[in-house]
Image (cartoon, grey):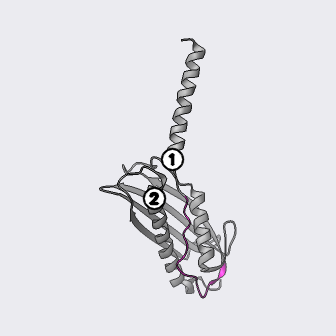
Amino acid sequence: MSVQDSRYAVSQVLALCLLFLGGCAHSIHVTPVPPSVSTSPIDHALQVQVPLLALEGADRMPGVIMLDWPVSDLRQAVIEYARQRRTFTEVHDEHGDYTLAVHAWLWLRSREAYRYIVHLEADLGPTGQPPKKSYVVEKETVGSRIRWVTTSDQAPIAAAVQAVLDELFDHIEQDAAVFGKQ
């Protein structure tokens, strides 16, 4: 086999590996919808930041094999959820009177069935100032015994995100007096 043939064979093997790895990733997209709309929104514009989305696999190692969930998807989900819920009069990703900074973790555990744990740590306060309130919310959902296709990850992750955002915004609304006029 010539050097040129060897290089071609290696490039073909690498291409197949990349195709296999890229084609098998479970692409996650969440679109949580609030169960209710706030009847008395906080009279401020909210900026949503999601600087962290960490994934930890079933073996407690960083990353989740075959799972692609970009932080931009979670950030957009939080923004749209907040807009629809109307807890604040306006919601943006680049400016606002108040900033909600959400750090998120997805932990995947396996026993008899896969368990998906979404953990949020959120700080809320006037933009450019220390937070007035901090929140920690964690919800767990149970998935299938086998992660063969994207839907086996999609549904339980979406359900856990829905549950954590519902609870987070319930807490924020209970604390509305704290976020009154600046």
> At x 55% / y 37%, what residue is drawn?
19
Residue topped by disc 1? 25
Q: Secondary structure under badge 2?
A: strand
- Residue 75 sits in quarter: bottom right
Identity, as a three-letter code, of the amino acid under mark 1: Ala
* Residue 179 located left or right of residue 61: right
The rendered magenta stretch, by its main secondary structure, is classed as loop
> At x 56% / y 27%, what residue is drawn?
12
Identity, as a three-letter code, of the amino acid under mark 2: Leu
Q: Which residues are magenta?
A: 29-44
Q: Callout 2: few (<14), some (14-19), or many (20+) C-alpha neighbours within 10 Å?
A: many
Q: Does residue 125 sit above or below 8 in this rendering?
A: below
- Mark 2 or 1: in front is 1
Horizontal and vertical percent position of residue 71: 57, 57
Horizontal and vertical percent position of residue 43: 66, 84
CA gap between label 2 and label 1 equals 16 Å
Residue located farthest toward the top when viewing the structure as drawn? 2
* Residue 68 located left or right of residue 143: right
Residue located farthest toward the right when viewing the structure as drawn? 95
Q: Is residue 14 magenta?
A: no
Q: Earlier in the sequence, mark 2 or mark 1?
A: 1
Q: Which is nearer the eye, 13 or 140?
A: 13
* Screen quadrant of the C terminus: bottom right
Horizontal and vertical percent position of residue 87: 59, 80
Q: Secondary structure under badge 1?
A: loop
Q: Does residue 104 sit above or below 81 in this rendering?
A: above
Residue topped by disc 2? 106
